[in-house]
Amino acid sequence: MDKAKVMAGVKKYTMIIALLLVTLFFTWRTGGKILLPQNVSNLIAQNAYVFVLATGMLLCILTGGNIDLSVGSIVCFVGAVGATLMENKGVNVWVSILVMVLVGTAIGAWQAFWIAYVHVPPFITTLSGMLVFRGLSNVVLQGMTVSITNEFFVKLFGGGADCYIPDFLGGGEGMNITCMVAGVLACAIYVVIVLRGRMARAKKGYEMEALAPAVTKLVVICLVILAFTYKLAQYKGIPTALLWVMVVVFIYGYITSKTTTGRYFYAVGGNEKATKLSGINTERVYFIAYTNMGFLAALAGMLTIARMTSAQPTYGQNYEMDAIGSCFIGGASAYGGVGTVPGVIVGAVLMGVINLGMSIMGVDANYQRVVKGLVLLAAVIFDVVSKKGGKN
Amino acid sequence: MAKILLEMKNITKTFPGVKALDNVNLKVEEGEIHALVGENGAGKSTLMNVLSGIYPYGSYEGDIIYDGEVCKFNKIKDSEEKGIVIIHQELALIPYMTIGENMFLGNERGHKFALDWNETYGKADELLKTVGLKESSRTLIKDIGVGKQQLVEIAKALAKKVRLLILDEPTSSLNESDSQALLELMLQFKREGMTSIIISHKLNEVSYVADKITVIRDGSTIETMDKKTDAITEDRIIKGMVGRDLTDRFPKRENVKIGDILMEVRNWNVYHPLYTERKVVDNVSMNVRRGEVVGISGLMGAGRTELAMSIFGKSYGTNISGQLFIDGKEVHLRSVREAINNKLAYVTEDRKGNGLILTNPIKINTTMANLDAVSTHTVIDKDKEYGIAVDYKEKLHTKCPTVEQNVGNLSGGNQQKVLLAKWMFADPDVLILDEPTRGIDVGAKYEIYCIINQLVAEGKSVIMISSELPEVLGMCDRIYVMNEGRMVGELDRSEASQEVIMSYILKSSNKGA
């Protein structure tokens, strides 16, 4: 019985354990360099687009292992449109941002329409989108690089040299007080939410998680938050891009776990026919998933051009693969119906740590690809094998 | 005494936490038909999986003695080499391959790199004849019905030089005449000297075809009855299976007042969704009253499911015409949502395929058709959801450790209860139950009948589609008989009998021919 419990625990937290082991490995191999404040900070800033895209990709994958191949091209196209408007046409920043969001969402809706209502396979539809919007990006940019000089835009989306939330509370060199305060606040809010949840359950007489594991979990999560913000505070503070990521993660984490709409994604992936016969509009579920993917791709596009302070026709290449990889590594099922936003974030961080660790170690870029590819395969093998084990 | 072909001695098989088989003994004589009966989860399939090597030697205790020697099967191939072939309840044929290709799948004719198609199809045609199929072996599987597919499975077994044929619920998806044909085929094989084991829930079939009947309950053998020496009655078998006397297989319904007409269908026509010129439901009119259980009887493929699903928010068919009245008002239900909102529920016959999300827990399945009732502004109250699932679990006596359990891990009867809970929670006035007791054991059937009685006692209406005549006769106040898409009869409980219903079906079929 105890052994079974331990096994269940290991299974539940496999990816977190894997992340821990990988981090330890690279700490050892890089002589601790990977945990330097600057590297921790870069990990977030560099991978912001992955977090955003992977969250959107999760919704697509939940519907039945369907992926969206076009996100990289949409990122590029949206960036190209925005950069051209802002820099070449002199359009107002806010108007440009609005146009970018609308363009991304419209592209998503275009693809979603074919997938949801005409039942064109998502793979084909988005493969088409991948080609179309890569081509159109080139057309818009006329094959050239457009530099982004609008400082407000760059700052807003966390790019450029000074891409951190300023320290309002006036900390000194090497210690950003605002960042630390934010970390402590985050912990406090988390503790309050957990406590209120428990109290509400106790009041209504519902079953509760046992006290000891609940407290352990709480303490561990708070420690992680504090350690993380401490690292960031030691460098330059909270990267602006992190704020965007947090907003996306919280909103989508909430939608997928707490709302009826979120439940529908899981239901469609679990058994589409049964879902349909339960009076749920399954076509609309597909439509929402792919339209939303376009919307988030637009956001990722803005983060990307801000970070690079330019738009180029080659941006966004292989972004779809990073997003898809993060989802599967983070425990989403290749058959749909299983996967969580926190899981996907862990998957994305794991990929990020592997990238960063290998870069610091000076591993050849080609071998980095090999390693990433094998990690992805291993994750999916694990998913398939553990499913098989559950059946017998 | 004839030679013992197979003896399974003191078989014990444990899964983590559960003892699935406990000292099971089974003796099968050469040339006999041996029936294995028991409730769902009693261990019949586990026993057969041990025999066929799905659970390899070493994962169980006890001995398998086959043809005089102790066998240690490690995989299915090992047992098949000895001539032991299992045909599973869920058919394992590939729809887009021909009959011949399916029959010799994994057992191909000719050389590995040069398949001999002439031999394949020639041999296949020969075998098809022995099982009484007139189809060419070049026909695609998807183009023949389930009954014929079952026969193809048997022909496939014959191609493997079978000595011991094991049929797991072979008639569960067949209609009465196809079932009969299958049983006759088994008897014919017996005359030719083949040994078979049949696993079945249908006691009338078992007592018709079997020489010996072994009853298994809770993983142990209860008794083996011999047709020659024992008086075998269905009551005795049932008693062995459930461990108690079922004085009445159908619970009494008392003091249920039958009220006004709650739902009525007039001149309902439905066409096939793909072959749009084919009429599946032909000018059907029917009604159901408050507090009434109405049965729709008929053979497989009579158009009963199609009728029900087309009423339920047009979830089947094209070019649907006719009128639908609920509570005296005409309604037009264009989607399943509208049907649910108009207090209609359709409980599917295919609980795994169309009813439940097997990989999700009981609580999520329970609320799926009425998620709005556990949420405010689309935010789900998970505690409320949990509470509701627990309520239904207790109300319907669903056997499960917790409602967090995945539905896929439950037995058929308990899955059916979760499915019923899901639709009861949607709070319908009219429930259409499509084969509500298919593939579930006697005890669970009784409980489902009790639930039906409870529903009508609350003033709801139940339409029960069933292929099992005793069940229709035992449960329904009124019975419609459907055949080839048409309503061919309407009977009151007092005037209905198996013979009358069958004669309605047969007469109407003759007219068509």
Image (cartoon, helix red, strand yellow):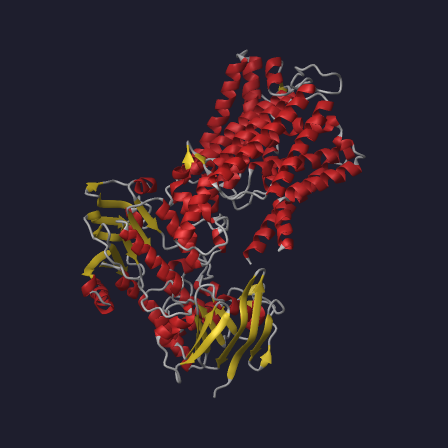
- Rendering coords of residue B508 (x, y %): 20, 63
- Rendering coords of residue B59 (x, y %): 61, 66
- Rendering coords of residue B478 (x, y %): 22, 58
Counting labels gives 0
| Front residue of A188 and A67 | A188
Q: Determine the residue positioned at 42% across, 78% down.
A: B189
Residue A123 appears in the picture as rendered = no
Q: Determine the residue positioned at 61% across, 28% down.
A: A188
Q: Is residue B230 left or right of residue A54?
A: left
Against B40, residue A162 (above or below) is above
| Front residue of B426 and B396 | B396
Against B480, residue A105 (above or below) is above
Q: Is residue A191 left or right of residue B252?
A: right
| Front residue of A262 and B176 | A262
Q: Quadrant of the C terminus of chain B?
A: bottom left
Residue B492 appears in the picture as rendered = yes
| Front residue of A332 and B85 | A332
- Rendering coords of residue B71 (x, y %): 60, 75
Kindly give the residue lying farthest to the right in the view shown: A31
Against B57, residue B360 (above or below) is above
Q: Is residue B264 left or right of residue A133?
A: left
Q: Quadrant of residue B8?
A: bottom right
